[in-house]
């Protein structure tokens, strides 16, 4: 298991390096207008050339990347080309926002999906069909469209929660929860639709196994069979879908952050991409990939704890 963890960490580091290099190369391929974006349309040719040299854009691409990488491994992601602020500081203020949205959505969608999926697996009649229809219907409505509807109805018409903005957790717990209510709910609808179907399918597959009938024949209660044995064996595929949902949420939160004016990783990355602020774009990608790698590693460790076959493999 230890060697497996080290292999996963090694592959995660390789993934982060590959992602950062690809993004760095793609951004540099379109960096000819960066100096103009910084200095404005009135800048002279000499000023543009001086700014290009100052940013190191005249150096070979591989040399620029290695210079960035050397600082990154020491925790320095460079400075923004447009406001000279530390990229590490700028992104550190944005990570809690995006993580709050993604983690909150995963928690809410998982709780609802587990309940809906188990009920649908246990009562495979009209209730099962109804739950499946409702779950699939959640895939029909795009998250950004639902977000706009919620802003109009819940915030503007009813005035229940703020329409835009973000309140840090350390500032106000209630304000933090209220600022996340609509964004999380907007994303959770689609996540529940897919995850609940996975929980239902995995639970049914385990319920139909021979050892479950053996446990029942020995007099174990239905609650004991379900919670101690069935759910434990149905959890691995569900956890895999959860990790995929989390990855999708890290990228899909961009639109939600725009709708609700949330200062997250997605919004700053989009703004930086538009003007060619390479240090911020690459830093945002690296942090997002690191978070995804960590989450996937944790999911694999949980799967190994739940399923001895995974540990042996």
Image (spheres, rainbow, N blue to C red):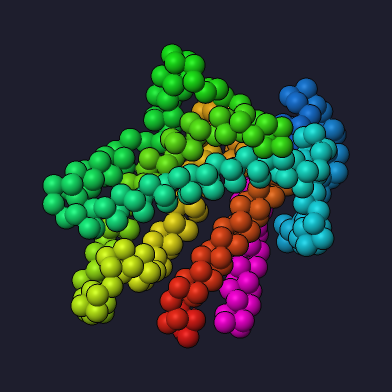
* Residue closer to the observer: 290 or 109: 109
Identify the magenta region. Answer: 1-30
Q: Is residue 272 visible?
A: no
Residue shown at 83%/38% (left/top)? 84
Residue shown at 59%/43% (left/top)? 100
* Residue closer to the observer: 221 or 91: 221
Find residue 304 and report its horizontal and vertical position in percent. 49, 75
Task: Look at the magenta stretch and give its main secondary structure.
Answer: helix
- For the N terminus, the quadrant is bottom right
Reply yes or no: does residue 35 show up in magenta. no
296 with respect to 118 (left or right): right
Q: Is residue 101 visible?
A: yes
- The residue positioned farthest toward the top in the image shown: 157
Find residue 22 and report its horizontal and vertical position in percent. 61, 57
- Classify 229 as above or below 44: below
Tag count: 0
Find residue 176 and report its horizontal and vertical position in percent. 61, 33
- The residue positioned farthest toward the bottom in the image shown: 312
Residue shown at 44%/36% (left/top)? 185
Residue shown at 56%/60% (left/top)? 295
Find residue 4 and report its horizontal and vertical position in percent. 57, 80
Q: Identify the image quadrant of residue 90.
A: top right
- Classify 259 as above or below 56: above
């Amino acid at each position: 298991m230890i060697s497996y963890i080290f292999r996963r960490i090694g592959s995660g580091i390789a993934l982060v390096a590959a992602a950062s290099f690809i993004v760095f190369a793609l951004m540099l391929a379109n960096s000819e207008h960066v100096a103009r974006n910084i200095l404005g349309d009135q800048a002279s040719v000499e000023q543009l050339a001086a700014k290009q040299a100052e940013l190191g854009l005249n150096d070979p691409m591989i040399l620029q990347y290695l210079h960035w990488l050397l600082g990154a491994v020491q925790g320095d992601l460079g400075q923004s080309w447009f406001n000279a602020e530390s990229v590490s500081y700028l992104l550190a203020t944005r990570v809690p926002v995006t993580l709050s949205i993604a983690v909150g959505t995963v928690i809410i969608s998982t709780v609802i999906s587990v309940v809906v999926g188990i009920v649908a697996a246990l009562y495979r009649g009209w209730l099962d069909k109804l739950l499946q229809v409702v779950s699939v219907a959640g895939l029909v409505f795009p998250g950004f469209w639902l977000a706009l509807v919620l802003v109009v109805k819940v915030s503007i018409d009813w005035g229940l929660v703020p329409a835009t903005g973000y309140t840090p957790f350390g500032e106000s717990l209630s304000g933090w929860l209220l600022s996340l209510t609509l964004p999380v709910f907007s994303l959770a609808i689609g996540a529940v639709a897919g995850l609940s179907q996975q929980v239902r399918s995995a639970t049914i597959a385990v319920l139909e196994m021979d050892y479950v009938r053996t446990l029942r024949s020995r007099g174990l209660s239905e609650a004991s069979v379900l919670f101690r044995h069935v759910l434990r064996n149905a959890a691995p595929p569900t956890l895999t879908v959860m990790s995929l949902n989390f990855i999708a949420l890290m990228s899909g939160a961009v639109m939600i952050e725009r709708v609700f004016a949330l200062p997250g990783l997605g919004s700053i990355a989009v703004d930086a991409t538009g003007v060619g602020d390479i240090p911020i774009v690459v830093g945002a990608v690296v942090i997002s990939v690191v978070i995804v790698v960590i989450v996937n590693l944790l999911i694999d460790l949980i799967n190994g704890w739940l399923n001895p076959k995974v540990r042996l493999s």
